[in-house]
């Protein structure tokens, strides 16, 4: 492959997964992520991997559960309604401490919604999606290069902490084309002595399971899992700051919305408005520390999102409600324009943090 | 540039067919009175000819495309007006075909009439920076798959090699040999090399048959 290639976001995810050692993909087609499956269908047979189009999303996620139990790297992908269908299986994987990369290329909702881009699965991704006490690590790329990089990172994090990881993109990120480099791919190997690979009568058998007959045992598992989550919150939060040094207004945006917001921030700066951005790269764990620190100099936060203010809750929790959080959003498959974001920034500058 | 009545653009998905189709339609409009773009893409949900509807209307180019383009109706439907491409032989048209063999399937239903009239060009749009068409052998594989699906023989190659925002003069210059090699291996002429407008002046004396392309700016592109 040439040094750099031009790829759709969806293709970059698929190629990055292969480079991360994923040789098992199970999926079911849904717009706007079908290129992931199409790419896997073309590439996997050539490299001794498995591409399987399952009969449904429910089947696909349970195939992922099976392969992950054997310690192999495995992935599935879908878009919003399909992730809802997979959520039972994702909960089972969390309960059985199984790693996997689950890709959600979001589209408008709720319900069947539409095929245009959206970020309205924020709650679903960051609050678990299925039943029970659990978290997913949620990665939110903002360029095709990050689609690739975070796919690889996602496999590593999943193996490191033995848990499912979600790559949360949106339709535009999946469909857009940008240059991407795979030159610096580094992936790690983790101990998987827990996997069911055959005992050869040399060790006690491993059990992969999320059912516990005694409530005391289930409670113990939950407590242990949340100790790990604490470690992840302390060590794995990722974010990027943009023009925050002297900012008095802080835009919080991720994914495609962050790209639009950046154009608006550049325009606002030309008008002399001191505005910057904190772009969460992990949505769980949410990058709380930089937001709390920003409250010392920032009078207003603006959540720019393609959902109905879902991220505001996390910003308020992170900032301990010290500053007002405004909302600038479009939903249902619409993307905010830089002018709309600029208007929100101007309004915040005028109010100056006064309610 | 000399156009046949129908200019069909096919290729690997993401090779740049739609943008070239829009730009060629403007060029064709300089030479012919009644010009249309036929959007046969039944695969791609985003980034379609419909995005250029305003510019095309202003230029007097009619756009024949699915009434559901850019909506949430995710079905591979084509309008009956599409038959004008073959039935109305006073019309000149650029036809944007969906990517790969899956996208080219839709062309098959118009193939008998196109072949019978035999006043068409079918160009393969190639980009060596797309990973699945980065060499001659892989590109010819895609080309043959499209041929089987569309039933229409190709008549030329369009080299649209680029790296998006990272494209430099060197990116384009170093792709010329690839374009020529694809042409040679397929036995077809290299019709042109397409570049963003900003590279045209500096490269026009270095690359034969260079054609400048305008690009649509989108809200999420760095401005």
Image: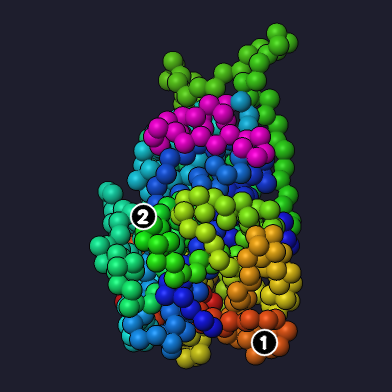
Binning the other alpha carbons within 10 Å of mark 1 as few (below 14), some (14 to 19) or many (20 upward) gives some
> Which residue appears at 70% of the width and 8% of the height?
A201
x, y (%) of residue A155? 61, 43
Earlier in the chain: of badge 2 and badge 1, it is 2
Question: What is the x, y in percent for residue A12?
Answer: 59, 55
Q: Chain of mark 2?
A: B
Which residues lie in the magenta part?
Answer: A45-69
In the displayed structure, would residue A209 be above or below residue A229? above
- Residue B2 is left or right of residue B53, and the answer is right
Q: Is residue A337 visible?
A: no
Q: Relative to B53, is A220 on the left or the right?
A: right
Q: Secondary structure at mark 1?
A: loop
Total number of numbered discs in the rendering: 2
Q: Residue B204: which numbered mark, if any?
A: 1
Residue B109: assigned label: 2
Q: Position of residue B22 (x, y in %)?
A: 44, 76
Is the residue at mark 2 from the same chain as the one at mark 1?
yes
């Amino acid at each position: 492959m040439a040094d750099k290639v031009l790829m759709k976001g969806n293709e970059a995810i698929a190629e990055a997964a292969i480079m991360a050692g994923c040789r098992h993909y199970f999926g079911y087609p849904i717009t706007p992520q079908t290129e992931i499956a199409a790419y896997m269908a073309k590439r996997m047979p050539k490299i001794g991997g498995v591409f399987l189009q399952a009969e449904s999303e429910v089947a696909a996620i349970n195939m992922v559960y099976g392969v992950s139990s054997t310690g192999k790297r495995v992935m599935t992908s879908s878009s919003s309604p399909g992730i809802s269908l997979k959520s039972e299986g994702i909960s089972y994987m969390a309960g059985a401490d199984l790693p996997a990369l689950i890709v959600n290329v979001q589209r408008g909702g709720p319900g069947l919604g539409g095929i245009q881009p959206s970020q309205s699965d924020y709650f679903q991704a960051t609050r678990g999606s299925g039943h029970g006490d659990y978290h997913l690590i949620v990665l939110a790329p903002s360029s095709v290069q990050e689609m690739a990089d975070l796919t690889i990172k996602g496999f590593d994090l999943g193996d490191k902490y033995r848990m499912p990881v979600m790559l949360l993109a949106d339709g535009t990120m999946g469909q857009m084309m940008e240059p991407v480099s795979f030159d610096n791919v580094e992936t790690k190997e983790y101990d998987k002595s827990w996997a069911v690979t055959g005992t050869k009568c040399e060790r006690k058998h491993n059990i992969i399971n999320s059912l516990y007959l005694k409530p005391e045992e289930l409670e113990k598992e939950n407590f242990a899992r949340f100790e790990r989550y604490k470690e992840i919150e302390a060590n794995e939060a990722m974010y990027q700051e943009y023009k925050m040094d002297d900012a008095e207004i802080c835009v919080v945006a991720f994914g495609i919305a962050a790209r639009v917001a950046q154009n608006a921030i550049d325009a606002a700066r030309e008008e002399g408005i001191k505005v910057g951005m904190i772009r969460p790269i992990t949505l769980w764990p949410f990058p709380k520390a930089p937001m709390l620190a920003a409250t010392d100099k920032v009078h207003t936060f603006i959540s720019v999102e393609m959902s109905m203010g879902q991220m505001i809750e996390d910003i308020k929790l992170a900032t301990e409600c010290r500053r007002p959080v405004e909302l600038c959003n479009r939903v249902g498959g619409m993307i905010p324009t830089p002018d709309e974001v600029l208007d929100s920034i101007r309004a915040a500058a005028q109010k100056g943090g006064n309610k | 540039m000399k156009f046949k009545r129908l200019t069909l653009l096919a290729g690997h998905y993401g090779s740049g067919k739609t943008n070239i189709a829009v730009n060629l339609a403007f060029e064709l409009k300089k030479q012919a009175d009644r010009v249309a773009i036929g959007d046969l893409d039944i695969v791609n949900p985003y980034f379609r000819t419909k995005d250029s509807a305003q510019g095309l209307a202003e230029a007097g180019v009619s756009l024949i495309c699915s009434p559901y383009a850019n909506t949430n109706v995710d079905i591979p439907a084509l309008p009956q007006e599409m038959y004008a491409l073959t039935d109305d032989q006073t019309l000149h048209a650029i036809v944007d075909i969906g990517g790969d063999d899956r996208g080219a399937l839709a062309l098959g239903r118009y193939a008998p009439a196109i072949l019978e009239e035999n006043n068409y060009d079918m160009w393969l749009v190639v980009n060596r920076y797309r990973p699945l068409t980065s060499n001659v052998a892989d590109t010819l594989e895609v080309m043959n798959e499209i041929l089987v699906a569309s039933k229409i023989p190709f008549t030329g190659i369009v080299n649209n090699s680029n790296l998006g925002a990272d494209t430099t003069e060197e990116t384009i210059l170093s792709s010329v040999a690839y374009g020529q090699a694809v042409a040679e291996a397929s036995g077809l002429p290299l019709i042109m090399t397409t570049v963003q407008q900003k590279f045209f002046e500096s490269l026009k004396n270095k690359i034969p048959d260079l054609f400048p392309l305008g690009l649509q700016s989108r809200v999420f592109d760095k401005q």
